[in-house]
Amino acid sequence: MSENVAAEAASSDPLKNVADAMETALQAAKDGASDARATVEKAMPAVGQFMSRLVYTTCYTVSYGVVFPTVLVARSIPGNNAMVNGLVDGAKAARDAVDQIKAKSMVEPAAGS
């Protein structure tokens, strides 16, 4: 009977109960953190795939929205007239100007060495 009284006194010790509760809470927090980490690790590939698809769709839409109307307008203009000849000559002049700027920028660093 004295053993029952001692066991009952030990189980009703408030400090022991608080320590057990704190240990249980700590273990629950550790388990929650590992569960959260596992959930994030599972979600990351899905987030990456979503972002990749979003970027692809955005770029596709923008390029389609620019190229389609441009080609539509270009195809609707008759081929051999002053406007088309002017556009072609202007594009050629712009390419020549860019080539001259590139050639000049390549010569300047070599002269400075």
Image (spheres, helix red, strand yellow):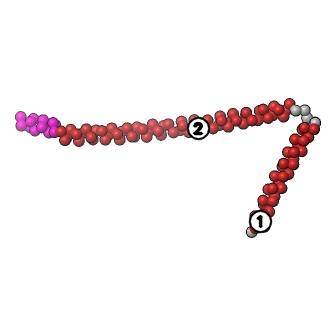
Reply yes or no: does residue 10 show up in magenta: yes
| Residue type, mark 2 in image | Met
| Residue 24, disc | none
Disc 2 from disc 1: Cα separation: 44 Å
- Sort mark 1 into few (<14), some (14-19) or many (20+) by Cα contacts within 10 Å: few
Residue named by callout 2: 51
The residue furthest bottom is: 113
Q: Position of residue 78 (x, y in %)?
A: 90, 32
Q: Along the polypeptide, which appears first: circle 2 or circle 1?
A: 2
| Residue type, mark 1 in image | Ala
Residue named by callout 1: 110
- Which residue is located at x 79 percent, y 35 percent? 70
From the viewer's perspective, tell me whether residue 28 is left or right of residue 104: left
* Residue 28 quadrant: top left
**16 and 98: which one is in front?**
98
Q: Main secondary structure of the magenta part?
A: helix
Reply yes or no: does residue 32 show up in magenta: no
* Quadrant of the drawing holding the C terminus: bottom right
Q: Is residue 99 above or below residue 66?
A: below
Q: Position of residue 82 (x, y in %)?
A: 93, 38
Query: Element under label 1?
Result: helix
**21 and 69: which one is in front?**
69
Which stretch did the figure color magenta? 1-13
The residue furthest left is: 1
- Which residue is located at x 81 percent, y 56 percent? 101
Q: Position of residue 19 (x, y in %)?
A: 23, 41
* Quadrant of the drawing holding the N terminus: top left
